[in-house]
Each structure stands twice: as structure tokens, then as C-alpha cells.
Amino acid sequence: MDLPAGITKAGESITGEEWRILGHIYHAKHECDSSFSFETYDPAGTFVPPHIHTTQDEFIYVLEGRFDLYLDGQWTQAHPGDLVRMPKGVPHGYYNKTDKPSRALFWVSPAGKLKNLFEQLHDLTDPDEVVKRSAAHDVDFLPPDAVKGG
């Protein structure tokens, strides 16, 4: 699929889809074979535990708030205007440990199966099922005891 020209407005999705996944809200911003981007709204206290994308590089551009990140075995923080680079195969997770919501633009390259995964995870509440479905879409979650500190 080729990238179509155009503008996706703030808070809108290219398809009108909105995915609610474990407390986060995602809106697709673009999709083509080479990449897929989505805007996130991350309420206070939400997180995505450490995982690995086996076939994609992932990026986060922080728009509002702060993220505490587990990135390649280290803890760090990202603030508005920061770009987080997460190469394929590198463990990473992000947490909103503040009392305010955060917003960010995420994208992966290539697009891979991530949009399809979001469609399957929408409104799913069973963490074990999230892990199982994610693995079938080239996203592998680390065991909870694999992360130290933070």
C-alpha cells in the first residue's frame, strides 16, 4: 500500500478508528507498507510493559507530559519535543508515572502487523490474551521479572 498525500488532523484517525487498549487510546495517523503511525493518549498511571518488536524499528515523539522509559535495560525519561528511538530487537516499555495524561506520536517501520494487532486488542482486558495475540503479530513481551528498578 502506498502512502496517500494529505493531512490527518489532531485527535483524528485516518480511518475514524479508535482503539482502547489497557487504558490507552490510540488513533491511526497514517498507514502504508513502509510505516505506520498513531497518536496516543496515555492517562496517568498507564503503561505498556517492556516488549520487543522483532521486525520493526519504533519511535516516540512526545507531545505532552512525560514518559518514564525502560529502554535497552536502562531507565530514562522523555519530555515534550524528545524523540525516542527503539530499534527492532531492543527491549522497551513506557510508563506514565505522573498525575497528568501524556500524548505522543508513535510510528513503526516497516508497518508490519501492528495495526492489525491494535484491532485485535481493542477493549481486551485479559493481559495473558494480550501477550498471546501480540506474539502472533511480531511483538514479544518480556517476563515481569526481566525488568529491574524503575
Image: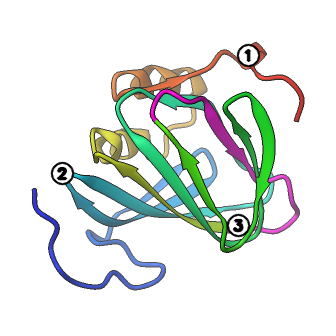
Quick check: 22 left or right of 78? Answer: left
Q: Which amino acid type is shown beneath numbered disc 1?
A: Ala
Q: CA distance from mark 2 to mark 1?
A: 32 Å
Amino acid type, residue under disc 3 in the picture: Ser
Measuring from the top left, give residue 139's x and y in whole percent.
Answer: 44, 29
Mark 1 → mark 3, Cα distance in angstroms: 26 Å
Disc on the earlier residue, 1 or 3 = 3
- Across and down, in percent, residue 93 comes to 65, 39
Q: Which residue is mark 3?
A: 102
Give the CA separation, mark 2 to mark 3.
Answer: 28 Å
| Residue 93 badge | none
Q: Is residue 69 above or below residue 30?
A: above
Can I make out residue 48 in this image? no
Range of magenta residues: 88-102
Q: Position of residue 64 (x, y in %)?
A: 70, 74
Mark 2 element type? loop
Residue assigned mark 2: 33
Residue toward you, 139 or 110: 110
Nearest the camera: 20 or 102? Answer: 102
- Quadrant of image for the C terminus: top right
Membership of 121 in magenta stretch: no
